[in-house]
Amino acid sequence: MIERVPKDKQLILFDGICNLCNSSVLYVIKRDKNNKFLFAPLQSAIGEAIINEFNIDTNQTDSILLYNPSEQKIFSKSTAALKIAKDLTFPIKLLSVFLVFPSVLRNWFYNYIAKNRYKWYGKRESCMIPTPELKAKFLD
């Protein structure tokens, strides 16, 4: 299943019922000028396959994962978010400078937002269904 991700792309797995996560996906799509990213909800079949392949504890990481098939690596939390930002347009790509800080410090801030995301932004009953124009950017 995970071999469906092209080697020249990276797959962003996101919480499909989270309003903040869905808004973030649309933000990335708009700024992904090099067409580097594909998307899938964590709750999808490919999301579950990657979670199982990399033994991800979804009690610890339940909001964003970045899968790089060319390196066979998975990134989570703040590292995933900052690696995504690095490949977007200016000025958001400048956020990648925070990768120099230890992940324990970055993840403290990230975890605080992730823990409160449903309370602050709400959640949906089901995963986002992409529009026909965006369908090619999503894997199910």
Image (cartoon, helix red, strand yellow):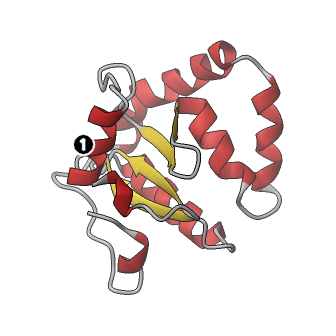
| Left or right of 94 on screen, residue 82 | left
Q: How many numbered markers are drawn?
A: 1
Query: Which residue does the image show at 53% across and 61% down from the upper left?
Result: 7
Residue 104 in the image: above or below residue 135? above
Identify the residue at horizontal 60%, vertical 41% (top origin): 81
- Between 14 and 114, the one lying in front of the other is 14
Residue 127 rendering spot, x and y as whole percentages:
23, 56
- The outermost residue toward the top is 104
- Height in image: 89 above or below 66? below
Q: Quadrant of the C terminus?
A: bottom left
Residue found 71% across the figure and 60% down from its top: 88
Give x and y (percent) for residue 65: 46, 40
Q: In percent of the image, x 68 and y 74: which residue is there?
A: 33
Amino acid carrying mark 1 in the image: Glu
Residue 107: horizontal and vertical position, in percent?
Answer: 59, 21
The residue beneath circle 1 is 48
Within the image, what quadrant is residue 135 found in?
Answer: bottom left
**Quick one: 137 or 111, which is closer to the camera?**
137
Circle 1: element type? helix
In which quadrant of the rendered image does the N terminus lie? Answer: bottom left
The residue most toward the bottom is: 133
125 sits to left or right of 65: left
Residue 22, position as x, y percentages in the image: 40, 56
Q: Nearer the viewer, residue 119 or 112?
A: 112
Q: Give the class, few, some or many, for how many residues have Cα within 10 Å of label 1's Cα (few <14, many ≥20).
A: some
Query: Please, which residue is most extreme toward the left here?
Result: 125
